[in-house]
Image (cartoon, grey):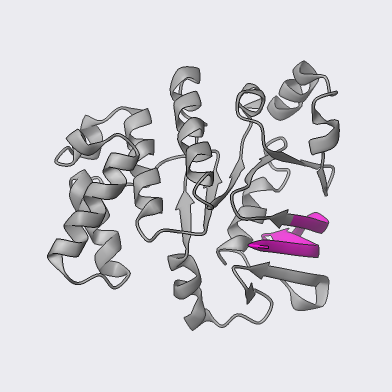
Amino acid sequence: MLIDYKKANIYQADVLILKDVDFHAEEGELVYIIGKVGSGKSSLLKTMYCELDLYPDETEKAEVLGRNLLDLRRKEIPALRKEMGIIFQDFQLLHDRSVYNNLRFVLRATGWKKKADINQRIDEVLEAVDMSDKKDKMPNELSGGEQQRVAIARALLNTPKVIVADEPTGNLDPETASSIVKLLQDITKKGTAVVMSTHNIPIIDQYPGTVYRCKDGKMADITMEYNKMDKKELEEEQKD
């Protein structure tokens, strides 16, 4: 089990937003988290990479990559994040440097020293996301879909066991969004778990996975019921 939460309470700005969360992610699993804005999706994801704290007296279990988040020390967080890939809706690329230098910055910050190793790894991840010909481009020279591909390449740099993606297709047109999720699905075939929040119900039908829903302060695994649910109703629910 790469991620294992049991009866976890999730807070945002001292407000309880999700109660008694049970959540799991296995190797090679594609996991979707759906729910309207403010339902707790992003807050839950942030606890996984310790951007938000969990409270030991209000959580039975919270483990990510074999680490107990309830007693994890601050100095141990960088090592945890090094084993994860994090993808944001707004890409969060450094706009004052090229694609190559964006990726180089991350590798240098996570302990890579040899130029040849750095160059080889950058070439590998850019090839994986079909962006090899954009290595010398600046982020503002790329489309939204291309920037998101670079963000995925960045997430792949340290061969993560888990990728956490917060609305990775939120700013993209349907065709580009489909290509991004196809790319993430391909990544799971190599054993990496991908956990992504999304409002995009059609994309789940296109690339099936485990589905959790945040609603009314609770989170539930609805995978078994999902195919029988009214998709239009679900789509409308995301917009509320």
- 116 vs 218, left or right, is left
The spot of residue 73 in percent (x, y) is 56, 83
The spot of residue 159 in percent (x, y) is 41, 58
The quadrant in which the N terminus is found is bottom right
The quadrant in which the C terminus is found is top right
The spot of residue 6 in percent (x, y) is 80, 64
Task: Tell me where residue 121 sits by quadrant.
Answer: bottom left
Q: Nearer the viewer, residue 219 or 83?
A: 83
- Magenta residues span 1-23
**Residue pictured at 28% horizontal, 40% vertical:** 127
Q: Is residue 190 above or below residue 136?
A: below
Type of secondary structure dominating the magenta stretch: strand
**Number of disc labels:** 0
Residue 96 in sight from this viewpoint? no
- 151 vs 7, left or right, is left
- 33 vs 143, left or right, is right
Look at the image and say whether residue 12 sits in the magenta stretch: yes
The spot of residue 237 in percent (x, y) is 76, 27
Q: Nearer the viewer, residue 157 or 233?
A: 157
Residue, far front: 190
**Residue pictured at 40% horizontal, 52% vertical:** 155
Task: Tell me where residue 52 sits by quadrant.
Answer: bottom right
Residue 223 in sight from this viewpoint? yes
**Residue pictured at 79% horizontal, 37% vertical:** 223
**Residue pictured at 24% horizontal, 45% vertical:** 95
